[in-house]
Image (cartoon, rainbow, N blue to C red):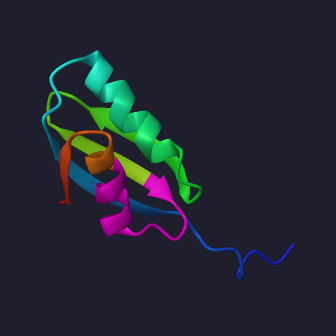
């Protein structure tokens, strides 16, 4: 099988402010994994960051999804 035409996953780190509990972590995670291009979102409450993996990620769209969930986010 020729895998040269299959896009490889990319990674975006978001810095999220406003998260203070596990509910916040779940809300941010759920907002991101609902996006079709997101394969995985690893939220770290202690550092306030999210490691997002997927194909065709748009950092601005990722940040917007987090903001629509009620938090501030910027690509790090």
Q: Looking at the picture, tell me which residue is in the foreground, 62 or 45.
A: 62
Q: Residue at x 15, y 28 (%)?
A: 46
For this orientation, the residue located farthest to the bottom is 5
Q: Looking at the picture, tell me which residue is in the foreground, 16 or 53.
A: 16
Q: Residue at x 40, y 36 (%)?
A: 29
Q: Answer whether residue 22 is magenta in the image.
A: no
**Placement of the C terminus among the 4 image quadrants:** bottom left
Q: Looking at the picture, tell me which residue is in the foreground, 54 or 58.
A: 58
Q: Is residue 11 above or below residue 20?
A: below
What count of labels does the image hold?
0
The percent coordinates of residue 72 (x first, y second) are 16, 48
The percent coordinates of residue 56 (x first, y second) are 52, 71
Q: Residue at x 38, y 26 (%)?
A: 26
Q: Is residue 40 above or below residue 76?
A: above
Magenta segment range?
Answer: 53-65
Find residue 20 and report its image quarter: top left
């Amino acid at each position: 099988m020729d895998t040269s035409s299959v896009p490889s996953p990319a990674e975006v780190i978001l810095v999220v402010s406003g998260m203070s509990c596990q509910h916040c972590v779940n809300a941010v995670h759920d907002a991101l994994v609902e996006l079709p291009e997101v394969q995985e979102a690893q939220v770290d409450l202690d550092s306030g960051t999210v490691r997002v993996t997927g194909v065709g990620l748009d950092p601005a769209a990722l940040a917007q999804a987090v903001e629509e969930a009620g938090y501030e986010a910027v690509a790090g």
